[in-house]
Amino acid sequence: GWEIERERERSDTFPVLDTVIRTVPGPGAELEEGASFTLVLSDGPEFRTLPELEGLPFDAALAQLAGLGLNGVEAPERLFSETIEVGSVVSWQVQGDADGTMQAGAQILPGETIVMTLSKGPEPRSVPDLSGQTIEVATTTLGELQLVVARGDDVFSDTVPVGQIVSQTPAPGESIERDGTVTVRISKGPDVVPFPDLDGLNFTDAQALLLETGYVIGSLLGTTDGTFVEATINGVDVLPGDIHPRGTAVDVIFL
């Protein structure tokens, strides 16, 4: 003989729809005939507040979702990210939310699935061509790509001016991880040597001095028992102190 009223609320304790959560008054209370008796029925489980997952390691994101009664899965493909570590969440979306309206702070029922796109780290850099640059310019060029320059041993070059880059490792166009190192070698210019003074030397001593200095004997006119008279390179007289490439052949006269 009571007047039955119904109220509804959400409950994690009684998540099944229309299950009685409690009554008003409760069990054992005295209630007169014709009085109101209220059934509080379950409207399903309580809503959860979607957390922000971006930047979280995947395992930590899974644990946080599980604590809210939500499921977490990894998206089929990972994305490059300059700021988020490998294996952490770059972006996420509620499965089936095509418009992406369900963002952090939105209300969601347990049992839903969150699809998380994970980071595969920074995108590898394509090594630029540093040929002809100075070490200062190369440092700036690589710094803009978040790469590091290292200077190898300087080398002689007949074609690259002094102070400019002759070669590099890795080569232009190769891929390298962010913060990787590119080693460059700088030109010392041509490998040239001054011509020595051969006046008064016999052939044996002159030959030894020429080899020591960086020259080689081309043709010999006269005798190896004689004394130095003249030296020419390509038919032109050469004097002490003249500069020529290392390994140049010298024609000599000994009488």
Image (cartoon, rainbow, N blue to C red):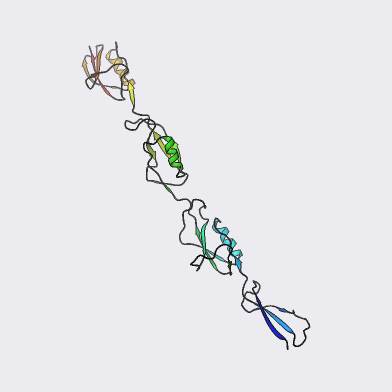
x%, y% of residue 125?
Answer: 42, 47
| 102 up-or-down from 160: above or below | below
- Which quadrant of the view contains residue 28? bottom right
Name the side, left or right, on which 239 lies relative to 23: left
How many marks do you count on the picture?
0
Q: Is residue 203 visible?
A: yes
**Residue 67 position within the rendered picture, expressed as x and y whole percent measured from the top left:** 61, 64
Q: Is residue 83 above or below residue 50?
A: above
Q: Is residue 146 found left or right of 105 in the rendered image?
A: left
Q: Is residue 229 above or below residue 80?
A: above
Point out residue 200 in the picture as x, y percentages from the top left corner: 29, 10
Give residue 209's quadrant in the image: top left
Q: Say which residue appears at 71% left-offset and 86% top-offset.
A: 3
Q: Position of residue 99 (x, y in %)?
A: 49, 66
Name the foreground residue: 27 vs 218. 27
In terms of image quadrants, where is residue 249? top left
Question: In the rendered image of this protein, does residue 239 appear above or below residue 37?
Answer: above
Q: Which residue is found at the position 69% from the left and 80% from the top?
A: 39
Q: Is residue 151 visible?
A: no
Which quadrant does the C terminus fall into? Answer: top left
- Residue extending farthest bottom: 1
In the rendered image, the quadrant that contains the N terminus is bottom right
Taking 124 as reference, is 67 left or right? right
